[in-house]
Image (cartoon, coloured by chain):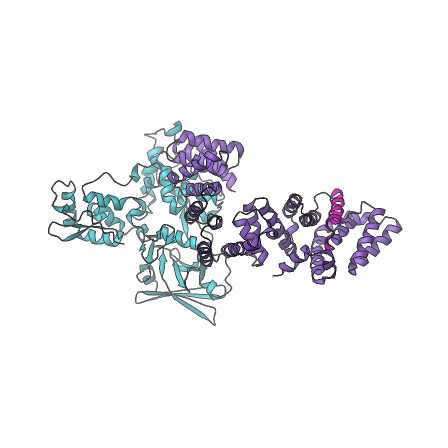
Amino acid sequence: MLTVNTRFAADWLSRAAWRGRGRLAASCRAGALACLLCLLVTGQLVWGQTAKGKTAAVTCATCHAGVTANYAHAPMRHAMEAGGANPVLDKHPNLTTQVGGFSYTVQTKDGQSTYSVTNGTETLTLPIKWMFGTHSQTWVLEKDGHLFESYVTYFARGEQLGVTPGDQRITPHNLTEAMGRKLPIWETEECFKCHASGAVEGAKLTLDTLRPGLDCERCHVGAQQHMADAVNDNFKTLPKSLKKMGAENVSNLCGSCHRTWDTVMRNHWQGPAFVRFQPYRLEHSRCFIGNDARISCLACHDPHQGVDHNDAIYDAKCLACHGAAKVVAVAAAVTPKICPVSKDKCVSCHMPKVELPGGQAVFTDHFIRVVKAGEAYPD
Amino acid sequence: MFFAPISKAITEGASNSRQNKSGLWSRWAWARGCVCLLVLTCVLVAAGAQQAAPQFDDLAGRAAAARDGGNLPLAIDLYGQAEQVKPDWAEGWFYLGMLQYSANAYPEAIDAFNHLLALQPGVPPGLALRGLCEFETGAYDDALRDLEQAVAKGAANQPRNEQILRYHLAELLTRSSRFQDALAQYQFFAAKNILDEDVLVGLGLAGMRTPLLTKDVAAGDRELYKAAGAAGYTLLEENTQLADELFTQLFARYPATPGIHFFYGFLLFPHSPELAIEQFKSEVAVAPGNLEAHAMLAFTLMIASRYAEAKPEAELVLAKAPDMEMAQLALGRSLAEIGDVKRGTDLLNQVLQADPDSLEAHLGMASIYSRTGRREDADREHKICRRLAK
């Protein structure tokens, strides 16, 4: 979506007083690629006009080239892709599985993927319209004007198809039901809102204008206004700094898609299927307290990059509170305990891996705790 | 469609009913279901009956034969005589009441069920049949009490019983302005694909928060409630796209009629607060004085974490209805989240005093304690939330 801002159609580049000019110019020279990337990444830009009358695009990358370049490869950026270009399916051009009386085939040829289901006598084949997920993938299909969630999903763990999480309870009775689950309007909105940008305006789904993946504005609310104002030398409308937010607020922000404690409690969700909702699990932890940024999602994760699966990377975060040399009493004067067993790879013991029902995927349990041998999954 | 003749038969006159074999068949079928539930409770009584006087045995045998032969007047007379001989015969009171219910002799049936329930308090078929009789005599409060208890005790476990009991219970709940409970009963019909005009009208009444029985709806309004019920039924069936179209048609056809946006918003609320908010906003535009709609709007905004918007809506409600819990929750949580922790805490505590198990109030308190660094209090509230959410 292009936002054409005509307010600064005059001479912003020629204004010597503009404090960002030098940085902008440097960024533009050094980061032409980043700008192009950002067009692809964010889809958000405002137009300025040079003194010579040429228009120039201002994007997030104009000033934040490094972070936008990183984000171009982040999973959240690729939370959804339109059908057509999919490295996962390119790598696995012929996926098949059998569930009950139905056979499934996901074929990729010449950059186009199709999803087929057959009961042996009839076959239903549809183009894959949208792909949700970067490693494991579920697809959204369209049939007769309705959107369906594919009944089978590609799971990265075994590099194979399996029943989509949550759909195990469904027993398909016909080819359409076997193809996928018809999405209610509210679920369609939720799916696209969290996996794409610009998919919902007000309460209406706007699939024609959506941008796949999450752009900067999704978390940095006000980024668009900031860009427009910065061009006019106005830096009073900076988006709220997420780094300064407490753990509770960050959990609520991330949890708007990854699910909050409140959401899980309100829905009475129980069991290991919900281990994938990290903000909710984190808030379970005894060390979680809402006014301390050291236990926020952002303390360990940079959403502009992929998740680091090296356990040792996170040790410093744990030891920031639990380090023997500098025990820091946090709010309420609680003294964090020192681990008597080890000082490294804390998460390997205190954040165990939990298999989703069906065993197709494994998630790190963000309920940080002393895990007792043989204990049941704690809700 | 099976439901319609049963419902109709119940409201028909006694003389008509006696000649209406299909109606009688329905009642007998229903009664057979009740008998299944009564079997356990009658075992002891049956044992006692074996020791009764020969006169009683004779009367009871002839009553059963008349009942099985479909001779209602004779059966009623014989069961009545038998009960005079042996008034603690619970099975007899049950059959007497059921036969009188079948004959549309509702006050007499109620009397028989009163005897049965005095002998065996709380027996579900007795409560259920007495409730249906009370419904027919217009003793609606009594009927609601009995049917609610009967359903809670499992009287609706048999499929055929379930339809008739849930329909009447839903009607009574709507009449008592317990709309949410009524909708829960109507959900059964959508889940089972039981489509009936009275069900649609009843669902429309409950959804649009109109405390009337379907029979009391003015002829000119019936179409509106039926159309609203059809849209709601479609949504409950999870055919959401069609439901959205049906509701949109209703909004165009009845742009100034209160209750339709509320109904749609209420059905959307558990699934998508954002979608529900749009409907509640439309409702308060149509009916600015509807405090319940303002409260739902405030509450839903709060659930959607749109605290700054929730605050003025909740304040508006509480200025006129200071005890409305939903508005207290919305304002309490919103105030706490946007910085007025003291006032927010007070309001949430006010809710907890009236309702100590309010999950929403405990979620709010957990959030307040967590973001203010009160670790022990936050832990305690989290534990309570987990218990309440199980």
Whether residue A74 is situated above or below residue A89 in the rendered picture:
above
Question: Quick one: which residue is furthest to the bottom in this view?
Answer: A121
- Does residue B300 appear to the left or right of B158 in the view shown? left
Q: Nearer the viewer, residue B362 or A184?
A: A184
Percent of width and height locating residue A257: 38, 47
Q: Residue at position x 34%, y 29% from top?
A: A328
Q: Nearer the viewer, residue B78 or B210?
A: B210
Q: Nearer the viewer, residue B321 or A131?
A: B321
- Does residue B262 appear to the left or right of B123 in the view shown? left
Percent of width and height locating residue A332: 40, 28
Question: Quick one: which residue is furthest to the top in this view?
Answer: A333
- Does residue A376 appear to the left or right of B61 in the view shown? left
Q: Is residue B357 visible?
A: yes
Magenta span: helix, strand or loop, mainly?
A: helix
The cyan one among the chains is: A
Q: Residue at position x 19%, y 53% from top?
A: A33
Q: Nearer the viewer, residue B77 or A375?
A: B77
- How many numbered marks are there? 0
The purple one among the chains is: B
Q: Which residues are magenta?
A: B101-119
Percent of width and height locating residue A242: 30, 40
B17 part of magenta stretch? no
Task: Look at the image and tell me in which quarter the N terminus of chain A lies.
Answer: bottom left
B107 part of magenta stretch? yes
- Does residue A85 appear to the left or right of B255 in the view shown? left
**To which quarter of the image does residue A136 belong?**
bottom left
Percent of width and height locating residue B183: 55, 49
Q: Is residue A368 visible?
A: no
